């Protein structure tokens, strides 16, 4: 499991990654947990109340209930694995001891690579969409091992679509293997962008959005980061990015894009890192290069 250009540290990590059979077992549990959460979300759809975690950032009882069933499924199979969850230990399910050392509720970013397995869980990505009945939301679960995302799934409970991937095993929608669109030119690209609920109009993040609008074929702000990445892996979008995200938003989706043949990276052309909360994802390295060329003059370097 060595590729040309790997340094010694990367080679060591790749050589100690779990085997295909173990990853498949972990993925099966992730899919079971996501489907169970999806049942909860379908039950709550259209009859939810919400409160603000932060200005314009909603959380509903469906978030809590979906997280509870996910944690229960994972704990039943893997009681010793670490969990990083969007709603944190205040859901009454994840104890402080189960919370990752160094993780904070404010950022949700783990302090360093997992020693063993670490699950990054968003029970309901697209809460505002869900609250309004807008049919674009998902449950996403990504599994990290030794600093690498090794398995993940994104479940759309309204369409019953499961996007899933294991490292080295490809990206799939059900039993159909996924491949990115192959788009290389930004002017031909359908792009999705994740922006905060409240946007600073002077921020480089927003100025990149404005810069992209008239350069790509068309642009979307869907309100669901995980599905942006899943759709990029499927070839339905050509690129997606988010610069104010959390590990649970990105873990499963970045693996899907990589395994579908796409390219992912971070600001400044750095390698993708769960801890940064940022991602640029594109169908091809050439398209990713164009995105970098737009971002860098705005200070995103």
Image (cartoon, grey):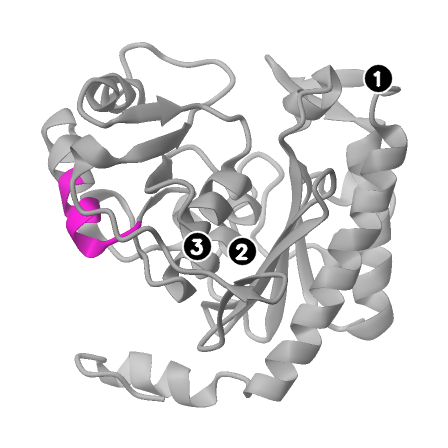
Q: Where is residue 75 in the image (x, y as percent from the top left)?
A: 82, 66
**Mark 2 or mark 1: whose residue is earlier in sequence:** 1
CA gap, disc 2 to disc 1?
Answer: 28 Å
According to the picture, the residue beneath numbered tag 1 turns out to be 49
Kindly indicate whether the residue at mark 2 contacts the one at mark 3 (C-beta within 8 angstroms): yes
- The image quadrant of residue 240 is top left
Which residue is painted at 17% across and 79% down in the image? Answer: 5
According to the picture, the residue beneath numbered tag 2 turns out to be 252
Q: Which mark is residue 254?
A: 3
The reply, left or right, for residue 185 in relation to residue 39 is left
Query: What segment carries the magenta color?
Result: 283-290
Which residue is painted at 27% across and 11% down in the image? Answer: 202
In reply to whether residue 289 is colored magenta, the answer given is yes
Q: Position of residue 294 (x, y in %)?
A: 14, 31
**Badge 2 density bin: few <14, some 14–19, many ≥20, Cα 10 Å:** many
**Badge 1 density bin: few <14, some 14–19, many ≥20, Cα 10 Å:** few
């Amino acid at each position: 499991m060595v590729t040309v250009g790997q340094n010694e540290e990367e080679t060591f990590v790749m050589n100690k990654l779990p085997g295909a059979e173990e990853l498949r077992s972990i993925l099966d549990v992730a899919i079971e947990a996501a489907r169970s959460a999806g049942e909860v979300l379908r039950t709550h759809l259209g009859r939810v109340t919400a409160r603000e975690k932060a200005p314009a950032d909603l959380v509903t009882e469906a978030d809590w209930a979906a997280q509870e069933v996910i944690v229960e499924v994972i704990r039943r199979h893997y009681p010793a694995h670490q969990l990083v969850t969007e709603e944190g230990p205040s859901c009454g399910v994840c104890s402080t001891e189960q919370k990752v050392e160094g993780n904070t509720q404010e950022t949700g970013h783990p302090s360093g690579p997992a020693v063993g397995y670490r699950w990054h869980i968003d029970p309901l990505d697209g809460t505002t969409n869900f609250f309004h009945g807008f049919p674009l939301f998902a449950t996403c679960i990504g599994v990290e091992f030794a600093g690498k995302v090794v398995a993940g799934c994104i479940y759309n409970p309204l369409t019953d679509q499961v996007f899933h991937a294991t490292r080295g095993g490809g990206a799939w929608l059900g039993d159909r293997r996924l491949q990115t669109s192959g788009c290389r030119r930004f002017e031909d690209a359908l792009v999705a962008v994740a922006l905060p609920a409240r946007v600073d109009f002077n921020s480089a993040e927003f100025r990149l959005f404005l810069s992209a609008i008239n350069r790509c074929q068309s642009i979307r702000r869907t309100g669901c980061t995980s599905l942006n990445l899943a759709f990029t892996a499927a070839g339905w979008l050509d690129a997606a990015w988010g610069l104010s995200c959390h590990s649970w938003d990105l873990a499963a989706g970045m693996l899907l894009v990589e395994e579908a043949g796409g390219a992912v990276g971070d600001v400044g052309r750095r390698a993708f890192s769960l801890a940064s909360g940022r991602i640029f994802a594109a169908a091809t390295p050439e398209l990713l290069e164009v995105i970098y060329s737009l971002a860098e003059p705005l200070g995103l370097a």
